[in-house]
Image (spheres, grey):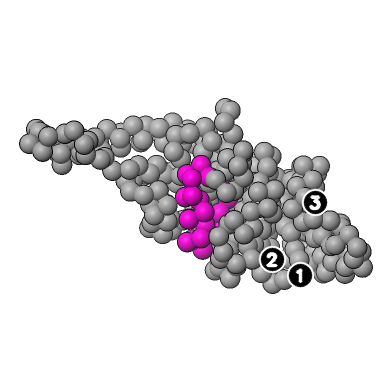
Amino acid sequence: MEYRKILVPLDGSESAEQALPLAKALAGKNTNIVLFSVCPEDELRLCRLNSAYLDVQAKALTAEGLQSVICHTEPGDLADRIKNYTAREGVELVIVCRQGYSDLSREEKVLQNLVTDNSSLLLVKPDAAKPRLSRILLPLDGSIISEGAVPHVIKLAKAAGLEVLLLSVNGFPEIPSDRPPAAKPSWEEYALVLMKEVREQASGYLDRQAQDFRQAGLKVKTQVVFGSVAESILKVSEEEHVDVIAMATHRRSGLDRWVYGSVAATVSAATELPMLLVRGSENR
């Protein structure tokens, strides 16, 4: 399984070009890589300059062995033009290098237009280490929205030959306000029982989700942890030497509200790993 079309927005900056190594790594024999740029509608001369710049980048990619590279430049707003182009041309993946380590809200207008029902967004941090693709982490919270990332992760994992790590993060049990201090068993003992039950339920859930990945011929592992969601995702990504973190966004509120509330924004700000962002759905 390979991508038919991967789009990389380029603006002439070195930071934007840092998305190209991932595009090359994910391109299959029949993948079309689209180098995309825009210019102000009243500065059409810049479109010609952008086209010349994209041609140079395309020749470099072709010289490195890529089969098909398409250059596309048009006037207008970047977010709107990319959104229209991806829908019209069937682009499945957009790879973007963020322009800094700022909070996602500063780039919300552009980013939320790049995550659509049919295309996912691979967000790359600037000046990050050369991409190594071997394992992808997908946190799942049991919601239909988070599970919407599954087919996108399968596609990316198949294209890059990635091992998949499914993660369930759970909160620690809290002492009920009406529980007597002298109640038996002790709260510590009872909390262990509750955590065991949660772990078993979460493990069963992840095992069921893992079947889709195994049926696709992918290697998949599962892990259940306790703690705060964002911190746990970051910790597991480091301990398990993850190369990509995948998360789903909510269709009604773009990137300002995530499946895990502010979790994905926290993870994105703290990690240097690429993030695969997909549009979650409330319908199976």
Taking the image as shown, residue 199 lies to the left or right of residue 134, namely left
> Is any atom of residue 51 visible in this view?
no
- In the picture, the quarter occupied by the C terminus is top right
Above or below residue 41? Residue 45 is below
SS at mark 2 in the image: helix
Label 2, on which residue? 16
> Is any atom of residue 271 visible in this view?
yes
Above or below residue 20? Residue 89 is above
- Say which residue appears at 66% left-offset and 69% top-offset: 15
Residue 142 drawn at (x, y percent): 44, 34
- N-term-proximal mark, 3 vs 2: 2
Q: Is residue 276 magenta?
A: yes
- Say which residue appears at 53% left-offset and 48% top-offset: 246
- N-term-proximal mark, 1 vs 3: 1
Q: Please identify the quarter of the rendering in which residue 253 is found.
A: top right
State the extent of the magenta-drawn residues as a range.
258-277
> Badge 3: how crowded within 10 Å, few (<14), some, or many (20+)?
some
- Say which residue appears at 42% left-offset and 52% top-offset: 230
Identity, as a three-letter code, of the amino acid under mark 3: Arg
Residue 240 or 38: which is nearer the viewer? Answer: 38
Residue 235 drawn at (x, y percent): 38, 56
Find the distance from the CA under tag 1 to the CA under tag 2. Answer: 7 Å
Point out which mark residue 81 bears: 3
Residues at circles 1 and 2 in contact by the CB criterion of under 8 Å: yes
Identity, as a three-letter code, of the amino acid under mark 2: Ala
Residue 68 drawn at (x, y percent): 79, 55
- Say which residue appears at 52% left-offset and 54% top-offset: 265
Point out which mark residue 12 bears: 1
